[in-house]
Image: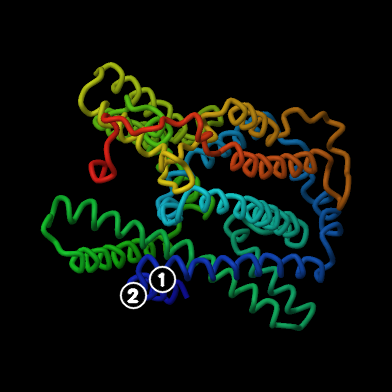
Amino acid sequence: MIVLFALVILLYVGIGGFRGTALTAALQGALMIFALSMMLVVIGLLGGFTAQMNTVWQVAPDKLTLPSTSTMTGWYSTIVLILLGLPTYIHIQQFYLGVRDAEDLRRTFRLQAPIFLFAALTLWLIGMFGSGALPNLTESQSEQLVPFLLGSFVQSQGGTLLPSLISLGVIMATLSTAGAAVMVLSMVLSKDLYRRYVNPEASDSRVINASRVVLALFLLLALGVSFSPSLTIWGWTELKFEFLLQATPVFIFGLYSHRIKNNPAIAGMIIGCVVAVGLYLTGNPEPLGIHAGIIGFLVNSVVMIGGSYLSGVDEETERAKEILHFNSREPSEETTTGTVKYILPAQSKSFWIGLGIVIAILVPWYAPESWNARAAFGLPIWTWGTIVALCIETAFVLFATYIWREESPTSQPSTVTDDQPSEEEIV
């Protein structure tokens, strides 16, 4: 089955290209949401959520009581890891770069925020339900929870249509993520490495063929990992974000400061990766409950910012200043100047205050012991507090799309000054 998956990914990514992959991923995402919805039906038909929570209270009450301080520190570390690592997720960037304009991107966030909330809560409900329905699963077996639950459904209910539809959604989700990842990575390596250093005169068709070869090599590597797993899926996810985090400082600081330079940024990424890998190899993947990637990220940021500012202002920083000024505006026919300047969320104090509040309440450090008492559906009070915090987080994302706005035309300059580069000069 794993080999068959690899062949399907190779065919539809290699033949379809980016546009075909993007359209396919949209259909696959819809099927995934449908499958998650059907899993809620399966939970109801297998006895309901509340009944299994009663079982969890009996066999594993530690899963429903307030976590320890060290555990909550680890939760905060994971939140920061994903929050800062996700923006540098390569294939997510590619899809966002494909939007038509800023308004289209804002609509995308408004649509995605509730979808992500639904997906996250549903997956959590499935996991909690499985803790009661199948309490004796090992760590590796827990990654097969959905197939186990579908098997239980077939045995108790006798129907196969619903499990088949859900399995289709699981397959589509797997193909969507894997296909997009290998497609983008293969194109990055072929264009940024092959065309730049190996064959600068290569035609587009030759670069595409090179990307297909790299894609096949990636799949062979993935197959080797699949047949000899050393980490759980979540372990691989964490490790992936540890490395993604080392590219984040460039985005965070480079988007808002023209003083960030190329060489210090590269040095910071390399040193950050060395620190993170070094902590892993020395048996300290989470010193003091903090992921090694976050420590590498901090070292990375210090090296990049310190090196950039200590080296002073030069031609590179002046060019970056012009580019940032140009990219803060978008052509528009609705203004007298022909351009619209956008006020980004990160340029608003209310955004940072709201972000701090949201992150603070996501982990229940503030919950008293009395919140361990059972509430609706057999869940403790503190769990409901966390669910409410997730809903507030979603509302905050929607709020951020509204403070991300256009600057009033009256405050824009009436003419374009001579020191502003043209679009041709930027390209």
Q: Can residue 292 be seen by looking at this rendering?
A: yes
Disc 1 element: helix
Query: Amino acid type of disc 2?
Result: Ile
Q: Position of residue 204 (x, y in %)?
A: 20, 64
Residue 314 as seen in the image, left or right of residue 16: left
Nearer to me, 63 or 334: 334
In the rendered image, the vertical position of residue 142 relative to residue 317, given as above or below: below
Disc 1 designates what residue? 20
* Residue 178: mark: none
- Nearest to the eye among marks 2 and 1: give it: 1
Which color mode does the image show?
A: rainbow
Q: Which residue is found at the position 53% from the left and 34% from the top?
A: 408
Of 422 and 302, the residue lying toward us: 422
Q: Which residue is mark 2?
A: 15
The earlier-in-sequence mark between 2 and 1 is 2
Q: CA distance from mark 2 to mark 1?
A: 8 Å
Q: Are marks 2 and 1 in contact (CB under 8 Å)?
A: yes
Depicted 85 relative to depicted 129: above or below: above
Residue 278 visible within the image: no
Amino acid, disc 1: Gly
Q: Nearer the viewer, residue 34 or 344?
A: 344
Residue 29 in the image, given as x and y percentages of width and height: 56, 65
* Mark 2, secondary structure of its residue: helix
- Quarter occupied by residue 75: top right
Asked where in the image residue 146 lies, by quadrant, the reply is bottom right
